[in-house]
Each structure stands twice: as C-alpha cells, then as structure tokens.
Image (cartoon, coloured by chain):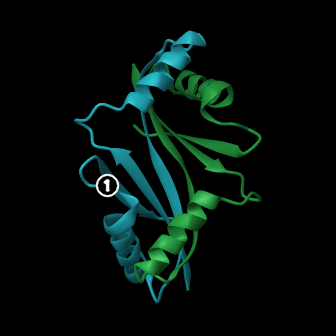
Chain colours: A green, B cyan
Amino acid sequence: MLYNVQVKVMPLKNLLDPQGKAVQNGLFSLGLNNVKDVRIGKHITLQIEAANEQAAIAIADEAGKKLLANPVMEYFEIELVN
Amino acid sequence: MLYNVQVKVMPLKNLLDPQGKAVQNGLFSLGLNNVKDVRIGKHITLQIEAANEQAAIAIADEAGKKLLANPVMEYFEIELVN
C-alpha cells in the first residue's frame, strides 16, 4: 500500500536561525511587527510503498537519519497523513 | 497572547520538483527504493502576538501572501498549534 508520510526538518531549538531572522526582519519592514519569532525548516512529503503503517514510518525514519536531516544542526519529526 | 502558527509552503502539485527528485534518487542509492515520490517545501513556524486566534491566523495569512510563498510556484497552508 502507498502511504503518505510527512517529515518536518527544523533547525535545533537552541541554534540561531539566520534565515528565519531575515524573514522576520522582512515581515517587520512590511508592517507585520506582531510576528515575534520565525524559524524555517523543510517540509518533505514522501510517498512510501509499504506493507503497513509501521513499515512506512520505519522507512521514513531511516530516510530522515540517513539523508533528510543533518543531526548536528537539525531535528526531524515524522507524521503519517492518511 | 502569543500564538504558535505553522505555515507549510509547498511547490504546486502540477509542477515538477527537481529538489525532491534529487532526494528521491539519493534515497534510492541508499537502498530506500520503496520511496516512490518526494516533494520538498518549507516549514515555517511563526510566533505571533495577537488578541485572538482569528487575528493570529489573519497575520500569518498576510505574511504568507506577502512574503513567505511565491504564488507562481508555491501554495501555503496555515495551522495553529496551541
């Protein structure tokens, strides 16, 4: 069966996020000064062919560890959609 | 009150996603050949100071339209977390 798995890759919470800071400054310049913090990561959707949900999540976890996230700077979270 | 709003910015569904294709090929090389499709977008978390949930979502929507997403190539979805 085909599973739709979403992987969220974000910068570690205790690291600075210069890209997010730049976007926050941009929003401020546009008048959106109620935005107090911005952090930017990646949102990856995977279509995985697997026997069951557990197998699909295991494959997504392996992909996250081996390729999608850099553990020095990022963490990732997995969510099964359907 | 401070609201935590997540904005997902993804490439439009009918457009090719070369970055996703490259990652899919990378996963295939790593032996993860059960991954049939990969699409990569941005995941943005905003901390928004607003009077209520509706106001926070309106600010996030304005940010998405004005800066976060390029409507020619991307769409965005907003989700309030807490």
B46 sits to left or right of B16: right
Which residue lies at the image location 44% right of the left edge and 85% below the top edge? Answer: B52
| Location of residue B6 with respect to B18 vertically, above or below | below
Residue at horizontal 26%, vertical 38%?
A: B13
Residue A68: percent from left, percent from top: 60, 32
Report how many numbered discs are placed on residues in the image: 1
Residue at x 38%, y 29% (from the top left corner): B18
Q: Residue B19's image quarter?
A: top left
Instruction: Locate residue A38: give its quadrant.
Output: bottom right
Quick one: SS at disc 1? loop
Image quadrant occupied by the C terminus of chain B: bottom right
Q: x and y percent of residue B40 in the render?
A: 44, 38
Residue B45 in picture, x, y percent from top left: 53, 62
Vertical relation: A66 (above or below) A80: above
The amino acid at mark 1 is Asn
Viewed as shown, does residue A41 lie left or right of B75? Answer: right
Is residue B4 in view from this perspective? no
Residue under pointer 1: B70
Give the letter of the chain under mark 1: B
Q: How would you rate the neighbour count of disc 1 (Cα within 10 Å): few for under 14, some for 14-19, many for 20 or more? A: some
Can the viewer see residue B72 in this picture? yes
Image quadrant in which you'd find residue A20: bottom right
> Residue at coordinates 46% horizontally, 89% vertically from top-left?
B51
Image coords of residue A61 (percent x, y): 63, 29
Q: Nearer the viewer, residue A60 or B61?
A: B61
The N terminus of chain B, quarter of image: bottom right
